[in-house]
Amino acid sequence: MWRRVNNLVNSLITYQSLSPDSRLRRQVARWLEQRPSLTSDQWFETFWEPESILRITSEFVYHSFSSYSGLQFAYVVPEDRLDKDLYWTHVCWFDWELTFFSDVEASFNIDISDYFNYEKIVTISDLIHFLDHQICMNGYVEKLD
């Protein structure tokens, strides 16, 4: 009986430490919402098209990273720092990187897990450039409408 109670308590403690910090997430979201909201197309055209980033890269980050973090990327700008501004490791689930790798593989048929170094990715711009480079290096060609 005590073993079950101890397991339950340990599970709850572990779950809490691996879960996003919802208070901090709301705080970051309020800070971001002071900015203008951009659609996915506007986000691409404003920030990434001038840098020759593929639209598919921009759209992937805009939608997927909103899902990982619970933050609306409609308000995120290239110079936002993942940890210092967005508190990334606190607002995401502990395994967001694994989900990211899996989503990239499913979307682009490439495995980036050996190349992704979170310590070298400081800003959203760094992240977009890294991902776009990986997509382009692996032969993905964006379809033109």
Image (cartoon, rainbow, N blue to C red):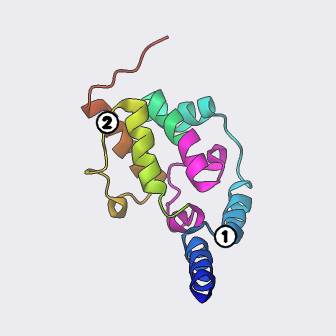
- In screen coordinates, is 1 left or right of 60? right
**Amino acid at the residue labelled 2:** Ile
The furthest residue to the bottom: 2
Q: Position of residue 73 (x, y in %)?
A: 61, 46
Whether residue 91 is visible to the viewer of this picture, yes or no, is yes
- In screen coordinates, is 31 left or right of 124? right
- In screen coordinates, is 77 left or right of 105? right
Looking at the rendered structure, the number of numbered marks drawn on it comes to: 2
Label 2 Cα crowd, 10 Å radius (few <14 / some 14-19 / many 20+): some
Q: Quick one: SS at disc 2?
A: loop
User: Which residue appears at 70% of the width and 62% of the height?
Assistant: 31
Vertical arrangement, residue 15 with respect to residue 64, above or below? below
Q: Quick one: SS at disc 1?
A: helix
User: Which residue appears at 26% of the width and 50% of the height?
Assistant: 115
C-alpha gap between disc 2 and disc 1: 33 Å
User: Disc number at residue 110?
Assistant: 2
- Which stretch is magenta? 63-92
User: Disc number at residue 24?
Assistant: 1
User: Which residue appears at 48% of the width and 28% of the height?
Assistant: 55
Closer to the chain start, of discs 2 and 1, is 1
Q: Position of residue 86 (x, y in %)?
A: 57, 62
The furthest residue to the front: 1
User: Which residue appears at 73% of the width and 54% of the height?
Assistant: 33
* Nearest the eye: 39 or 21: 21
The answer to if 71 sits in the magenta stretch is yes
Vertical arrangement, residue 55 with respect to residue 4, above or below? above
Classify residue 136 by image quadrant: top left
The answer to if 111 sits in the magenta stretch is no
Q: Position of residue 107 (x, y in %)?
A: 43, 32
